[in-house]
Amino acid sequence: MSNIMIFLSAGIPPAPPRIFWYYQITGNEAVFMLLYTVQSGESLYQIARRFGVPPQRIILDNGLANPQNLPVGLHLLLLTPAVTYTVRQGDTLSAIAERFGVTVVVLLQNNPQLILSPTLQVGQEIVIGFTAGKRRQVAINGYAYDFIQPDTLRRALPYLTYLTIFGYGFTPEGRLIPPADGPLLELARQYQAVPVMLLSSITGSGNFSPQLASQLFQDAVLQNRVLANLLAVMDQKGYRGLDIDFEFIVEEDAEAYLRFLENAASQLHARGYFLHVDLAPKTSGEQKGLLYEAHDYESIGAIADFVLMMTYEWGYTYGPPMAVAPLNQVRRVVEYGASVVPREKIFMGLPNYGYDWILPFQRGITRATAIGNQYAVEIAQRQGAAIQFDTAAQSPWFSYSRDGLDHVVWFEDVASVEQKYNLMDEFSLLGGGYWNVMRPFQQNWSFLAARYNIEKK
């Protein structure tokens, strides 16, 4: 029988509260994913009863630290599985996966409680799948520093196609400056995430160095020494691709940068590795500014195997309060990028963080604090703040006062993530690239697992 997809929405101010239903009708059974906006006075248990979803499942899929006090305007992901299995004596995850024709990683995606505690209990209900037919397959890349908390990384890895480890630097003599990547590489292998090495021109000060980048582009001996050292480490440690993240390249080095990328691609491909390049968020080929001018989308798109369009940081540490990745601005970048770069090469950037600003904003003085998306919800809970949803940016925000100071917070949630993936689907992009996976965001991961087949190599 053919599948029928029905989409319904309803809204009541002020959040605006919304109910999004995704019905997948298979035979006589309808299963669904629902995004629901919490109303004033509602409890988790009332919502659970209303929609027939176990409270513990809601807590799990939404990463709720305090389920007793839901802020008004919070978007909740409610999932009802299509297929479940009750654990019997002697069952193992691998045996259950084999029985149902899925992988152990898919079981972990659908049952995040098993990621850190994989021991099965007799009588325990395991979700095998949420829908009979998902939208499509997507590739997911996540960036991480070497100081990530191991459990945070474990919670993300089942949902990642690639883990890009930030990052390797280099000296003017060509020596590599490595991160402590051993533990991350081992975890990536355990969860079938492809490890990707990252090279940047960031120095010990934590800033991108146009001067160091220029030396690399202009000096053939230095360039080949750095590439040889990178390839040796990739061979030794099991990296399967190289991510190039060079930002703030002077315009005069634009051509030399392209020649460097061609050289890197040639040497990587000869060893069976791929090249991934990070691109500043441009909306036209003529866009001016140090961040943009040397990032020639069309030329780089022809050289690289994959690119990341860094569609975030409109709202940033030193800027005025606004969404980190407003959908109206992200769309402009995607429209341009997809017109000059093969769409099957494009990862669209997704921010796994938000910012908390103290008001009034004073340019040159105000410095926003970066926070996790789940932590933003905890702030709203503690402060009794109602979460709003900006329709142009398609992003959540709220305001509160503490210690005599007014604050405003912009962050991401399952509703803003859903809109970004709608955009990816509209343009048939390869998938999403998360900057970064240093903070938990279970809503996002559970949404992905329910809606897409996540590519695993």
Image: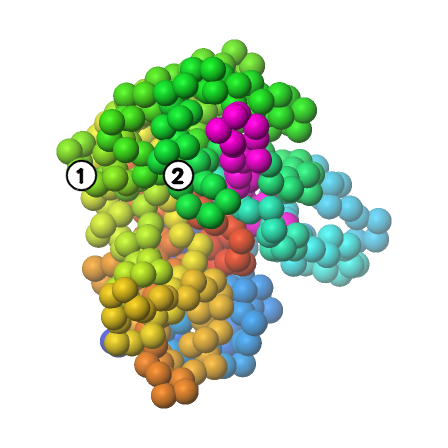
Cα gap from disc 2 to disc 1, whole angstroms: 19 Å
Inspect the image, locate mark 2, and give the three-letter code of the amino acid beneath it.
Answer: Ser
Q: Which mark is drawn over residue 288? A: 1
Inspect the image, locate mark 1, and give the three-letter code of the amino acid beneath it.
Answer: Lys
Quarter of the picture containing the N terminus is: top left
Q: Residue lying at the far right in this picture: please name it.
A: 90
Few, some or many residues within 10 Å of mark 1 (<14, 14–19, 20+): few
450 relative to 179, above or below: below
Image position, residue 182 (x, y; %): 68, 39
Of pointers 2 and 1, the one earlier in the residue sequence: 2
Q: Give the range drawn in magenta.
A: 154-177
Q: For mark 2, what is the residue?
A: 209
Is the C-beta separation of discs 2 and 1 under 8 Å?
Answer: no
Give the mark count: 2
- For the question of whether residue 69 can be seen, the reply is yes
The residue under the point 32% across, 81% down is 406
The residue under the point 28% across, 61% down is 319
- Between circles 2 and 1, the one closer to the viewer is 2
Q: Which mark is drawn over residue 320? A: none
Of 64 and 24, nearer the camera is 64
Of 454 and 154, nearer the camera is 154
336 relative to 442, above or below: above
